[in-house]
Amino acid sequence: RNGVAMKGYPLLDAFLTVFWIFIWIMWIFLLIRIVSDIFRSHDLSGVGKAGWTFAIIIFPLIGVFAYLIVRGDGLHERETRQAQASEEAMRQYLNRIGAPGGSSADELTRLAELRDRGVVTDEEFQRLKAKVLAA
């Protein structure tokens, strides 16, 4: 007021601002995903990893699109293999931890954790505790 014209913020400007923020966030997500794929990829040599990283840092737009064109078809397979390997490692760990033959103290600790989380009732805890101590 006071003689100064106030500029509004039309709806189209607001839409464009939200659109560009969305594009920026998607770009950052894509960069992070590609860089993590480069370093987790077992079929790339050290020189290959350095080259792709250099290309993405120096020429971000061209480097990312070149990576997607050249290696994009295997991106999902590499990610799936990594997830399966992680799941298998977790399964082996859980089998090793839950395997019989652990000490009584370990079993009592696990039972107490189950009771604290509400998985077993106090009566079940006492019964299982007596069974562990009797063994």
Image (cartoon, grey):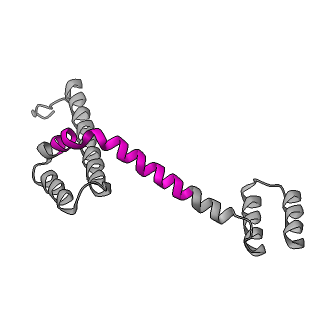
Residue 80 lies left or right of residue 33; in this view the side is right
- The secondary structure that most of the magenta stretch takes on is helix
Residue drawn at the location 84% of the way across and 61% of the way down: 125
Instruction: Please tell me how many numbered marks the rendered image carries.
Output: 0
Residue drawn at the location 13% of the way across and 52% of the way down: 55
Residue 78 lies left or right of residue 69; in this view the side is right
Residue 91 appears at what percent x and percent y? 58, 56
Which image quarter is the N terminus in?
A: top left
> Magenta segment, which residues?
64-90
Query: In the image, is residue 13 above or below residue 134?
Result: above
Residue drawn at the location 13% of the way across and 35% of the way down: 2
Which image quarter is the C terminus in?
A: bottom right
Query: In the image, is residue 81 above or below residue 17?
Result: below
Residue 39 appears at what percent x and percent y? 28, 57
- Could you say which is closer to the camera, residue 32 or residue 46? 46
Q: Quadrant of residue 94?
A: bottom right
Residue 69 lies left or right of residue 129; in this view the side is left
Q: Quadrant of residue 69?
A: top left
Look at the image and say whether residue 113 sits in the magenta stretch. no
Residue drawn at the location 72% of the way across and 71% of the way down: 102
